[in-house]
Image (tube, grey):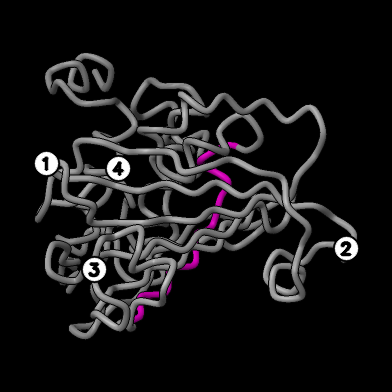
């Protein structure tokens, strides 16, 4: 029954399961701090694999509706009217259409004191640095710099970096469903390098979004800063009740 019902909608099965559980939470069929059914129970209920169920639960965790207690399972998170859900992808926005990404360079560089602290790496560890400019209709609207602890043999093809977000770039090293992303959004003034890449005056207003990616097993796997021309980019959050 579950399998037939899931095939009606032309969306991924794991997303359909997540939406169904989300509806139960919104209707308070599952109340704050209630346990979500176990992975085994969800597999049986929806006639899907354990991997599919885990993807669904990860979506709910990222949406801030569910939290995980190691060894016990997933539970409904208590929310209130001051909670908002922000979905972020550095190469895609509802308010703008990024249609071209230019790779400035891909280099292995020496780690700075700041990167050693942020990435939690040994001072002698080198860092893979990826710099890109994001365009809309030939207008540069974003400039991002990604830092990844460098390990010889890590596969990386420049042409595959152009349209990928940070998690997708690291897909050969990590599972996208085992990563926590800490997001920080800050209004700033453009420094010389950023202003030059964006084609704006030094000191112009920009929106800086930093992402720290942490894998549950590997620890910190990457750090990214993306600088946006504040005239073109807006971030939108949804109220989560």
**Above or below: residue 118 compared with residue 87:** below
Left or right of 189 in this view: 75: right
| In this view, the mark in front (3 or 2) | 3
Estimate the x, y position of residue 64 in percent, counting from the top left: 36, 64
The magenta region covers: 175-186
Mark 3 or mark 2: whose residue is earlier in sequence: 2
Q: Name the residue under label 2.
A: 122
Q: Which residue is drawn at 87% across and 66% down?
A: 123
| In this view, the mark in front (1 or 2) | 1
Q: Mark 3 points at which residue?
A: 200
> Of helix, strand and loop, which one carries label 4?
helix
Quadrant of res 17: top left
**CA gap, disc 1 to disc 3?**
16 Å
**CA gap, disc 1 to disc 2?**
42 Å
Of 204 and 206, nearer the camera is: 204
Mark 1 or mark 4: whose residue is earlier in sequence: 4
Estimate the x, y position of residue 225 in percent, counting from the top left: 46, 63
Q: Marks 1 and 3: CB-CB under 8 Å?
A: no
Q: Main secondary structure of the magenta part?
A: strand
Q: Name the residue under label 1.
A: 137
Mark 1 or mark 2: whose residue is earlier in sequence: 2
> Of helix, strand and loop, which one carries label 3?
loop
How many neighbours does mark 4 have within 10 angstroms: few (below 14), some (14-19), or many (20 or more)? some
Mark 1 or mark 3: whose residue is earlier in sequence: 1
**CA gap, disc 4 to disc 3?**
42 Å
């Amino acid at each position: 029954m579950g399998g037939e019902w899931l095939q009606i909608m032309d969306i991924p099965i794991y997303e359909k399961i997540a939406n169904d559980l989300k509806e139960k939470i919104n209707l308070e069929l599952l109340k704050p701090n209630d346990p979500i059914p176990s992975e085994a129970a969800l597999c049986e209920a929806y006639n899907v694999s354990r991997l599919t169920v885990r993807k669904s639960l990860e979506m709910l965790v990222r949406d801030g509706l569910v939290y995980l207690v190691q060894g016990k399972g997933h539970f409904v998170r208590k929310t209130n009217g001051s909670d908002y859900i922000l979905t972020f992808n550095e190469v895609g926005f509802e308010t703008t259409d990024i249609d071209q990404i230019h790779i400035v360079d891909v280099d292995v560089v020496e780690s700075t004191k700041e990167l050693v602290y942020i990435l939690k790496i040994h001072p002698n560890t080198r860092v893979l640095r990826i710099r890109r400019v994001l365009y809309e209709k030939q207008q540069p609207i974003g400039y991002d710099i990604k830092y990844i602890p460098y390990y010889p043999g890590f596969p990386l093809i420049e042409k595959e970096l152009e349209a990928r977000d940070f998690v997708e770039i690291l897909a050969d090293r990590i599972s996208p469903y085992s990563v926590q992303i800490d997001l920080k959004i800050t209004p700033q003034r453009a420094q010389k390098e950023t202003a030059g890449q964006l084609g704006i005056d030094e000191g112009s207003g920009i929106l800086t979004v930093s992402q720290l990616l942490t894998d549950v097993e590997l620890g910190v796997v990457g750090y990214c800063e993306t600088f946006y021309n504040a005239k073109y980019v807006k971030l939108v959050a949804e109220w989560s009740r």
